[in-house]
Amino acid sequence: MQEPRGTTIPRRDPNVVMRLARLGSFHQSRLSFMRILTRRMAREGWRFTRPVFDINSDGVGHAVYSAQGPFRTYSLVAFAHDLPPEQRSDRVIAEAWDATFALFDGVPTEADVLRLSKNVPQQEAGRISESELSLSRANRSVRLWSHMVDALASGRQPDNDQIGKVGYLMRTTAVYGSGKFGAADREVIADRPEMQVPFQAEMLSVYLTRTFARDLIQHMARAKGGDGSVMLDPAIARQLGIGNSTGLGMAPYIVNHPVLFNNWIMAREEAIARVRSVASASAAEVALFRDLLRSSALSVAAWRSDHPIQMDKLARLRTELDALNAFVAGDDLINDHPWDRLLRWAESNLGEDGQEFIASLMLEPYPDLVDGLAHCMADGNADAFRINGAMPVGRVRDSIEECFGWALNLDWAAPENSARAWYVSEEKLEPRLGERFKEPIAEYEQPLAPARDAALLHSALAEWSAKAPIAEFLLKHPEHRHTLRRVQVAAIAPYGEIRDNTISAKLLPIDMLRCKLSFFGATHFDPRSDRWVRICMYAGAPYPEELSESNADRWVYPEPVANG
Amino acid sequence: MSHSLNEVEATAKRAARGAGFCWGLAEEAGKAARWLCANGLDGCGVLARLLDDLAGEPLSARSPMSLDGDWAGPSGRLCPLMAGATLSDCASRLNDGDIIMSGVMHPALILPFAASAAQQSRKEVTVSWDGLTAMTNSSGVCLVDAASALTSPYAAQVRVRAGGTADPVTSHVTRATPDGEHWATLNRFAHRTYAPATEASRMLGAGAGLSDND
């Protein structure tokens, strides 16, 4: 990653950044995948159309939404269903949904839609093809849905309070991409400029899904109320995001893709380092920061959760925001490396949540320093998989000590340090987390405890000559091969490894989920247990017909703020 | 029905793990099957046949006993995933002379690893057995003569050498169309990696708790 001239303050130490408590406190930023997408679509003047909306008065049918960029068109094919309430569940074990979707690469023909209609509603039980980039589904928020249909049908706008309590009309669960269930592989689209940044196809699918949900509720209100119905106020519509329920499937993802994960974290860390290195800020930059800080406080105030861990975190974050406001009221933030000063103050006075909140927020005034880093976030290094067998044992040992030194003295035989095991269930082929000493799962364990495995490798290397090539060791000990690969990757990807115990009795998988979701740009994390979480996506964002360069970026901040 | 290459890789990896390979070699199996499919060869078929043929014996019996001299396993047979991964790990040894492997099961699985060695040395690597010659480099593979030996279940000797006389250019494909029987075999092995569901795991493992309806 190339540093611009003038980056005088180094990136933060991976030993600080890669702890779970911190990763589980990340916030969205300029480098979030949703914002990268909306900025690009506005800048390039994408055109949006709805060539098909064939849905009956019971809400059953299909629709097609097309997004046309400078080179290609992508289309969301949406199927709306009439789901009996007892079947409505977001869990992966569900078999029916209110709506199902595929993102089509191009503009689908009637034959494509017919083929998809036989497969997409079945989700995991169906098959899609190389013409599709993602497969997803969504359920309605029952209470907000019926409130809004009733209100609009009877000629009233929906109640703001009701909208605030839920925040979305529909929530998606899994959005499958990258070759799953027959879809096109990531490699098929990775070279397209508009798809080079990770998860752009999935983010586009969700963006169009939000539009579909708005259109469908309008359609249902009209079907119910006829001429007495009213159009939904666009300002109210903009408040609505798309919910998302996310479970354990995301946690293994960030362990299984260390180079990709490194690139996300490193891009953000580089952005933070660049902004900390700004020697003096302009009045306009500081004014924008202050505006967005006020706006963020509104967002934090509206953030609801019933989960005790999150309630505690929110209470602390709100208190810390008060302290932050007091600090920035007494500092002009103009001279002597103001952002570095601010972050160092936060490190001494706030918890991880408050620190990461500031770290993300202070990037906002600096699109020129930050936004280009989006292009460093993909994983284009297929060669990282290949083991360098000539590397001497001594260097392997050094690398382990560098990245996993913290794990070498941990007592891995102690039950609390190996309490959990990650496995894949036969039932839905989904990752699960079990109790190693209470359930018969150890023999099915997935390799998702890199730190324990690194400690085992380190110990196995103890008797080997420092000069021996590691290939000789691997010939005798292939059981360490997956770990050796990670250790070699860690040497080029310092932020690729979680530097915490992923099988500890104290592990909170929601920390891993929040980290990944923050890079999507999600807000209002609402854990529903220690291992699944609800979030909101695109709340505040302009709809396709409103999207412009003036509103494409800072929509995540709830008050209208003039673009600086 | 066609499959994505990610599906091939994921299924092959799980299948190899289910057949008893350690994770690191299972990862190699996934990449190897994917590479063969991407180059238009039947990666799923050859892996399925290998896993079916590997019964009972520990991996150490089918691993090279030493990197010096010809590579041979204690059982007289070499697993192509273990021998192949070792070839990739020791790519620089090709500069010192040919590597000869004795008694290689399903030798087509050596090719992806030869390509990996070629990428490291940035020149062609040639693999030959039973009259078949295959040249690989970073862009693909080309087969010369006796292509039927590609599906051989066994080669008494496989010779790997640096250099090549042809320019291997494969027209890469982005989909795989494995034979249904072979795909089923891979899935049968993959299934062994899945923990049977229990009511406890259903409730706790995925973290139920609060209702997801609102």
Image: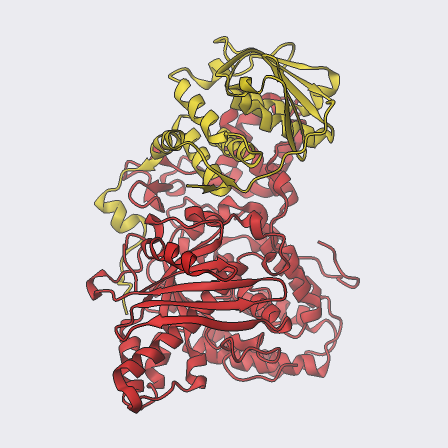
Work out whether A325 lies above or below A526.
below
Work out whether B6 lies above or below B155.
below
Work out whether A315 lies above or below A381.
below
- Residue A523 visible at all: no
Location of residue A212 in the rendering, given as x and y in whole percent from the top left corner: 41, 71
Using residue A510 as the reference point, say whether residue A360 is left or right of it. Answer: right
**Number of numbered discs visible in the structure rendering:** 0
User: For residue B7, what is the image quadrant?
Assistant: top left
Location of residue A310 in the rendering, given as x and y in whole percent from the top left corner: 39, 65
Work out whether B40 lies above or below B67.
below
- Point 58% across, 83% down: residue: A291
Which quadrant would the N terminus of chain B be assigned to in this image? Answer: top left
- Residue A266 visible at all: yes
Location of residue A49 in the rendering, given as x and y in whole percent from the top left corner: 50, 73
Q: Which chain is yellow?
A: B
What coloring was used for the rendering?
A: by chain
Using residue A104 as the reference point, say whether residue B157 is left or right of it. Answer: right
Of A288 and A184, which appears nearest the observer? A184
Which quadrant would the C terminus of chain B be assigned to in this image? Answer: bottom left
- Point 44% across, 84% down: residue: A234
* Colour of chain A in the rendered structure image: red
User: For residue A240, what is the image quadrant?
Assistant: bottom left
Location of residue A223 in the rendering, given as x and y in whole percent from the top left corner: 28, 81
Q: Residue reaching furthest right?
A: A5
